Amino acid sequence: MHLDPFTRVNDLPFTASKEDVQRLHGTPLKTGRNSVGLNELDYGSVIYRFQDCGRLEEVTLQAAVVIIGRRSIGFDALSFFIRAEDESCFERAGFLVSPRFGIAFDPTEPFWVTALAAHCLDEWRRL
């Protein structure tokens, strides 16, 4: 995963629409609404979640390595890295959430990492 926090995940900006994602990836394997009311486009190894208004909220993908700027962090070291580099990190529902780097992940579920749009951090805090 190449992450520019709150701006883009790999080559996809957080300003992307569902149509942009579908142009890039084609027809998803599954679509639906998750338990927190987000609309999902599920491609198997990556899931895009959108608000009803069409705004991209989260991108979850399998990431054995997360690249932030010039730093490459293996999933096995990600918890340590987040705790050391983001004093504002917090835990919710089994996820470690980093407001500084805009990610959430369950350290016990390799290698799934969720990149977050800046506007959804308050929702994570309220969980």
Image (cartoon, rainbow, N blue to C red):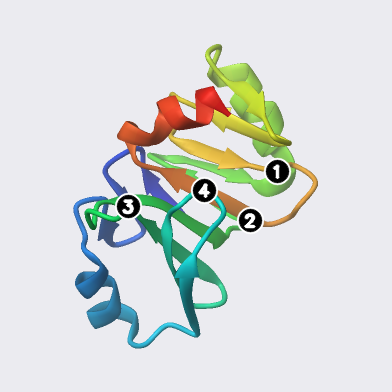
Q: Nearer the viewer, mark 4 or mark 2?
A: 4
Identity, as a three-letter code, of the amino acid under mark 2: Trp
Residue located beneath label 1 in the image = 106
Sequence-wise, the earlier of marks 4 and 1 is 4
Kind of residue at disc 4: Val
Are there few (<14), some (14-19), or many (20+) residues within 10 Å of tag 1? some
Residue wearing tag 2: 112
The disc at residue 51 is 3
**Residue 7 vs residue 28, the one in the foreground:** 28
Whole-angstrom CA distance, mark 1 to mark 3, is 22 Å
Query: Which label was assigned to residue 36?
Result: 4
Q: Nearer the viewer, residue 60 or 51?
A: 51
> Which quadrant of the view contains residue 81?
top right
Identity of the residue drawn at 53% across and 59% down: 34
Q: Which mark is residue 42?
A: none
Q: Quadrant of residue 17?
A: bottom left
For the point 26% across and 43% down, which residue is it? 7
* Residue at mark 2 to residue at mark 1: CA–CA distance: 7 Å
- Give the answer, above or below, for where 47 lies relative to 60: below
- The CA distance from mark 2 to mark 3 is 21 Å
Cβ–Cβ under 8 Å for marks 4 and 2:
no
Q: Amino acid at mark 1?
A: Asp
Judged by depth in the image, the label closer to the viewer, 1 or 3, is: 3
Q: Secondary structure at mark 3?
A: loop
Q: Nearer the viewer, mark 4 or mark 1?
A: 4
Helix, strand or loop at label 1? It is loop
Is the residue under label 1 in contact with that under label 2 (CB below 8 Å)?
yes
